[in-house]
Amino acid sequence: MNRVHVGVIGCGYWGPNLVRNFFSSPATELVAICDANPVRLESVGRTYGAVKQVSSVDQLLETGIEAVAIATPVSSHHALATRCLEAGLHVLVEKPLAATALEAQALVDLAERKQRVLMVDHTYLFNPAVRRIKELVEYGELGDLYYVDSIRINLGLFQHDVNVVWDLAPHDLSIVDYVLDYQARSISAWGCAHANPDIEDIAYVNVDYGDRMMANFHVNWLSPVKLRQMIFAGSRKSLIYNDLNTTEQIKVYDRGINIGSSEEARHKAQIDYRAGDIWSPHIAPQEALAGVVSHFAECIREGTTPLSSGHLGLRVVRLLEAATRSIRAQGGRVVLSNGIGVNANANGHARENGYGQRSPDRTRRAAGKKRRDPLLR
């Protein structure tokens, strides 16, 4: 099988992980790495002697690659991905897909016109534990789902062009999208900024998925401890997913309540508590990012749609954008319907907004100011 010739743009925090996996994957050949910072470029490149080092997209396009992975600040995703798609490359973009839903939609449309693979690096979708959770949900092991409760907190890393919701929540939003396959109905969020008055570093996000299913997400850059935990609670059983527990990432609890089946019992709220077994399914160890890389190459070779497609990335960006609007409105609920957000502000008034559009009273963008990326020269 011919290996996919790939380049990686961005040698900062996440880029070196992509470089390592593309270099070691039998499905890909890492041809070049690109970064406008010569120090970072040389630091990463010295480990991969035969890989070309370039400082601009123009130079990268001359290396004969057929696909590219973009691991740069969110504000640059749209410009860089657009340039690469227009040049006929398949594109993998670090999460989130773009800084606005309009930019994300434009990338999805461009990829479809060019008939190129557009994939978002929602890494957790390739985590064996998350895939096992999806199996348990689909097989009905948990019964009807009641809620998802997620906490993703740590001390740092502080971002300069996105708030904590845009930085951390994409992981959990993409997991819920993948596992449950529910369409969000409305969203409400609260956040506070401490280190930088323009960028929230702690936030709570509530998403209503309809049919009595809701999800809560706590994201935080100020926590003294690091926690990565999700609870999926159902009518039959519940499970806790602890990403930091390397031996028992998933625990399934046969604990919950039994409500009387008769109308009289339900009316009187007659509830019995159930306390059964706890078990932990075996999860085979595997680096999720290796799965991202091999899946990206497979989709290119077979012409198939990625699991973490541009459409999934667009859905996540829409939720992030709506959450930020809600934060600006002091937790006002944003109703999501057919790509339109109806934002109920602090005074209870509703205002319709197309995704990605800014209201006149919004003076700040959640994802930083527009600027020309130094790689595009």
Image (tube, grey):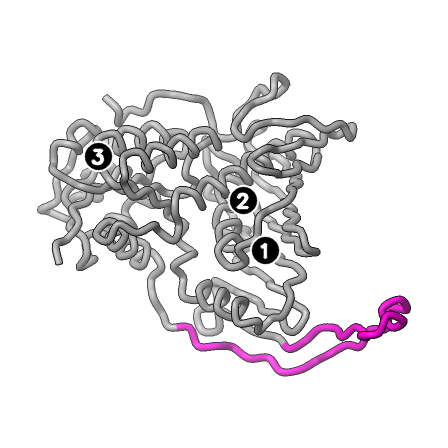
Q: Residue at x 65, y 59 (%)?
A: 147
Can you tell which of label 2 and label 1 is closer to the viewer? 1
Sequence-wise, which precedes: disc 1 or disc 3?
A: 3
State yes or no: residue 272 in magenta.
yes
Type of residue at label 2? Trp
| Few, some or many residues within 10 Å of mark 1 (<14, 14–19, 20+) | many
Secondary structure, mark 3, is loop
Name the mark nearer the viewer: 2 or 3: 3
Image quadrant where one finds the N terminus = bottom left
Q: Quadrant of residue 334?
A: top right
Q: Which residues are magenta?
A: 254-283
Q: Which mark is residue 111?
A: none
Label 3: few (<14), some (14–19) or many (≥20) C-alpha neighbours in 10 Å: some
Of pointers 2 and 3, the one earlier in the residue sequence: 3
Q: Which residue is mark 3?
A: 88
- Identify the residue at horizontal 38%, vertical 47% (top origin): 309
Mark 2 → mark 3, Cα distance in angstroms: 38 Å
- The disc placed on residue 221 is 2
Q: Position of residue 350 (x, y in %)?
A: 72, 28
Q: Earlier in the sequence, mark 2 or mark 1?
A: 1
In the picture, residue 197 is in which quadrant? top right
Q: Amino acid at mark 3?
A: Gly
